[in-house]
Image: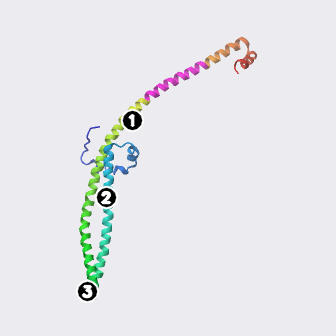
Amino acid sequence: MGKDIDFKDNIVKRNKIPILIYVPEWIQLFSGNKSRNMQKIISGLEVLIARNKECDSELYNLEKRKKTVMNKILYLSKDINENNNKTALSKMAEAEKEILEINKKIPVLLEELESIPERINDMNTQLLKETIKKAYELIKESRSEAEKCQVQVNDLRQKLAELIQRKVDMEERVNKLYLFIHGMIGADEMESLDESFLP
């Protein structure tokens, strides 16, 4: 289907459309019916979602490490001031260097974390568009298949009606034949004839 889909002003946000790959109905309807485009977008979406988790985790660990190093600096500066500890000076320099590194990394991560949700939303919107295209393809296919089934059902109904009529006709014939023989020779004779002719 080559048609392009244009949504009115941000339908995804307005309709609070969730991340499709986590929606049970979407999984049920499309897990075995993905187009190549859908597959490509899903891979990109999975990468972004994984990166978002990674960034969160990195940020959490950096904040934790920063607290630890800050406490270390407080302890070392006390040691330097009160005990004039020379070995503490090199440790202090190392700790300060680490804090500078952490302070460089945190804003970079925060910036990335800020941009990811919008990118996820864009990809989810693309996936929604591709999903709609695929859905209409499947609707057309399914309708056509349903029509074929209806034709077969109609044929079977016709055949069934003919078979039922034939069965009724045969039973009626059996009754008429019995009645004729019965009328001609009576019930007693008929019983012995039934035994020899209808084993």
Splitting the image into 4 quarters, where does residue 94 fall?
bottom left
> Mark 1 belongs to which amino acid?
Ser
Q: Are marks 1 and 2 in contact (CB under 8 Å)?
A: no
Q: Where is residue 109 in the image (x, y as percent from the top left)?
A: 26, 63
Q: How crowded is mark 1: few (under 14 residues within 10 Å), some or many (20 or more)?
A: few
Residue 118, disc: none
97 within the magenta span: no
Q: Which residue does the numbered mark 1 point to in the structure image?
A: 142
Report the Cα–Cα distance between label 2 and label 3.
44 Å
Residue range (magenta): 150-170
Sequence-first disc among 1 and 2: 2
Q: Residues within 10 Å of mark 3 (few under 14, many from 20)?
A: few
Sequence-first disc among 1 and 3: 3
Q: Main secondary structure of the magenta part?
A: helix
Residue 74 vs residue 140, the one in the foreground: 74
Report the Cα–Cα distance between label 1 and label 2.
38 Å
Q: Which residue does the numbered mark 2 point to in the structure image?
A: 51
Sequence-first disc among 2 and 3: 2
Q: Where is residue 143 in the image (x, y as percent from the top left)?
A: 38, 33
Q: Which residue appears at 52% of the width and 23% of the height?
A: 161
